[in-house]
Amino acid sequence: MPHGGTGRTCAALFRLRNDRGVLQPCRNRHCPKCQASAAHRWLDARQADLLPVEYFHVVFTLPAPVSAIAWYNKRVIYGLLLDIAADTLRTIAADPRHLGARIGATLVLHTWGSALTHHPHVHGIVPGGGLSPDGERWIACRPGFFLPVRVLSRLFRRCFLEALEVAHRHGQLQFFGEYIGLADPATFARWLAPLRICEWVVYARRPFAGPNAVLEYLSRYTHRVAISNQRLVAFDERGVTFRWKDYRAKGRTRYKTMTLETGEFMRRFLLHVLPGGFHRIRHYGLLANPVRRASLAKVRELLHVAPEISPSPDDHVTETRPVFICRHCGAPMIVIDILARSAPIRAPPIRRDQT
């Protein structure tokens, strides 16, 4: 084990020693194993923000041509996707013809399809209502209806393409391979033309089981990457076999397995590694970090909901969820041995001809 590690055993059944070595957690945000506890903490924090109102699940998806150039421009295009999706929601919601209110939203970036393909889209959870412009009334959506998706789609398309043009004009985009010609402004303008008339996929739907169900759904993805360990089936001379869901199929035929040559599997996985420091979970409007506490307090007051009581520091006890659980009894695992880090693997010395 070049990374070192620990030997662990079940805390409840210490006499049944588990001698299997467990690698030290890397805590990389792209590791599906290490991010499980972070997802639990995120879910607990968001549950404290829930309001007694309807919540809607919204999705904004980039068309395939834009997704193709996003490979080389992740920070710019992913950032635009999140921010413009949020601006679109807030703009339409503020329009008196629709809701006429200031809303909040939590958006999460996903970059993958089930087969590890590059499919950038944003999932969001949005309360079904907002504060009036003067901040003195709660304005609720019509039951079961949030905002018109066609209007959302049209505004999202226009604003995104305008921002993309600005980024190109300021030299913020780079192009390679078959897209190298898009560096020319005239060529880029012609490339944009069909995107102004094609459909951009946006939808909003009411969660079937209440707001907690939406948070539960989002928490499964916020701290994971393109594939979880549970979907991995085999690794052999053919490559890596994993389960995936074909959304174009129906019924049981949706669930399939796919085998990719090892290099291709790694290529697809690495497509979804985000730039350093990029925030894929963002809060906007009433839920933005600087105003969240005050906004939620005001909304609870208007809805006649008891305010959240924060425990004093002396009384507060943080419950830490165990990272490693015994697969037999569910009890936490305890460390019983430390595995020393081995020497790193080095290339053989360079042979120099004797003169």
Image (cartoon, rainbow, N blue to C red):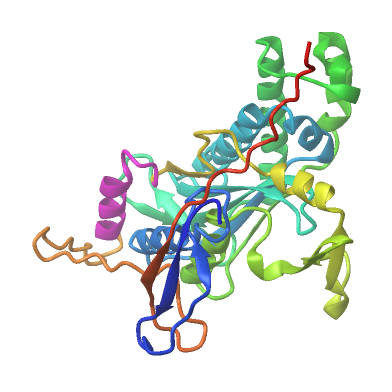
Residue 256's x, y, as percent?
A: 85, 71
User: In the figure, 167 relative to 3: above or below?
Assistant: above
Residue 189 as seen in the image, left or right of residue 276:
right
Q: What is the magenta segment's predominant secondary structure?
A: helix
Residue at image position (71%, 19%) is: 173
Quarter residue 197 falls in: top right
Residue 154's x, y, as percent?
A: 72, 38
Q: Which residues are magenta?
A: 287-302
Residue 61's x, y, as percent?
A: 72, 45
Q: Is residue 95 magenta?
A: no
Residue 142 visible in the displayed image: no
Q: Residue furthest left?
A: 314
Residue 20 as seen in the image, left or right of residue 249:
left
User: In the figure, 166 relative to 130: above or below?
Assistant: above
Q: Quadrant of the C terminus?
A: top right
Residue at image position (72%, 48%) is: 269
Looking at the picture, tell me which residue is in the foreground, 313 or 129: 313
Residue 82's x, y, as percent?
A: 58, 39
All told, the count of numbered labels is 0
User: In the figure, 310 relative to 68: above or below?
Assistant: below
Q: Residue furthest front?
A: 355
Residue at image position (59%, 61%) is: 145
Looking at the picture, tell me which residue is in the foreground, 14 or 181: 14
Residue at image position (38%, 89%) is: 13
Residue 298 visible in the displayed image: yes
Looking at the picture, tell me which residue is in the foreground, 10 or 345: 345
Quarter residue 88 falls in: top right
Quarter residue 254 falls in: bottom right
Q: Quadrant of the N terminus?
A: bottom right
